[in-house]
Image: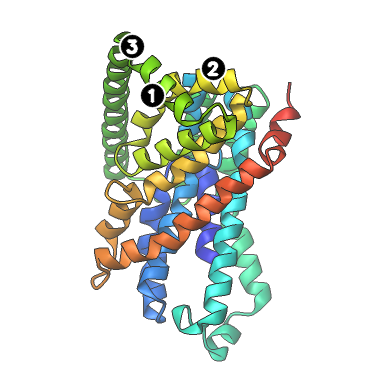
Amino acid sequence: MAVVVVCTVFAACTGVIGASVVTMALLAMPMMLKYGYDKSLTAGTICAGGTLGILIPPSIMLVLMGDQTGLSVGKLFLGGLFPGVILSILYITYIAIICGRRPELGPPLSLEERMAVPVKKRISMAAINLVPPTLLIVGVLGAIFSGIATPTEASGVGAFLALLMTIAYRRFNWKMFKEVVLSTGKTVSMVMLVLVGASCFTGVFLGIGGGQVLTDLIMTLGMGNKWLIFFIMMFIIFILGALIDWIGIIYITFPIFLPIVEKLGFDQLWFVICVSVNLQNSFLTPPFGYALFYLKGVAPPGVTTEDVYKGIFPFIVLMLIGLFLCILFPNWVLYLPSLIG
């Protein structure tokens, strides 16, 4: 449960999943396994918690969706906040229930170990360690919502604040700085290549009339029922999530789906957030799930791929439950964005 909470805080600092999954796998997983936690539950918790980074603002996914749709990134950030919290609560609730029914999956610490660190000290330590991520969250999101910076500029604010904190904690060195710059360059290059390839594919596909054919197919399968059509689109995105990168999914499907959404009278912002919740599964569903490979790459010896795959399926179900809640209660998504002009 603490891992999910920490991943939620991480999500509001990073906007990506790799940092959360790898960090928690390196720090929390060895300790959890040492105390006899179930391997599958441990792996599933870290993978699912790490994926919150792509939904809770400042999410890079929502930035790209805003660019593709023309919607306000600030409103998308606000729209993604509550669904992200809902998923976090669902994960914590599931862990509490499953470990309550089967304590051997997540055995508690002994009374002596719990008494070794008083509750007041635990709270004070947690509060102190929350200061750096809080400053990052306030700096990045505050710059966006106050109108001082665009999302792109706010990412620079976040990077600068992280650099200052690294120096303040005396962790800065030139080797680390070089690795960060190279890693960032590789990631940006990869993303840009995917964007170029997806844009070329979409342009050719739409240019030869493929978009209209697919639109007619979806409308025919939906038999004129807008909700059936909506769920067909969600199903297509879910299946694609297991097969290709989420960036490609956005750039391929949005030019086709958004006109259908507008024609059916759905709120575009609500639809985009529903898609972003749905795409949480793309990081967990094999064979393409990013989080699975991130975790397996740094997992302690003895954690098999089978353990990882087995652990993520309950959380995929929980993600789908979160998606249905957003569909049933659209105001959970739209309320915060409605507060800004």
Residue 61 is marked as: none
Percent coordinates x, y for residue 40 in the rendering? 37, 69
Q: Amino acid at mark 1?
A: Tyr
Q: Earlier in the sequence, mark 2 or mark 1?
A: 2
- Residue at horizontal 40%, vertical 81%? 36
Percent coordinates x, y for residue 253 in the rendering? 41, 26
**Location of mark 2 (residue):** 70
**Location of mark 1 (residue):** 251
Q: Amino acid at mark 3?
A: Gly
Does residue 268 sit above or below 7 in this rendering? above
Q: Earlier in the sequence, mark 2 or mark 3?
A: 2
**Screen quadrant of the C terminus:** top right
- 2 vs 3, front mark: 3
Tell me the SS state at disc 2: loop
Instruction: Tell me the distance, in whole angstroms, between the alpha carbons under discs 3 and 1.
Output: 17 Å
Percent coordinates x, y for residue 226 in the rendering? 58, 29
Q: Amino acid at mark 2?
A: Gly
For the residues bearing labels 2 and 1, Cβ distance under 8 angstroms: no
Task: Tell whether 138 sits left or right of 18.
Answer: right
Task: Tell whether 174 sits left or right of 250.
Answer: left
Tell me the SS state at disc 1: helix
Badge count? 3
Does residue 296 sit above or below 40 in this rendering? above
**Location of mark 3 (residue):** 209
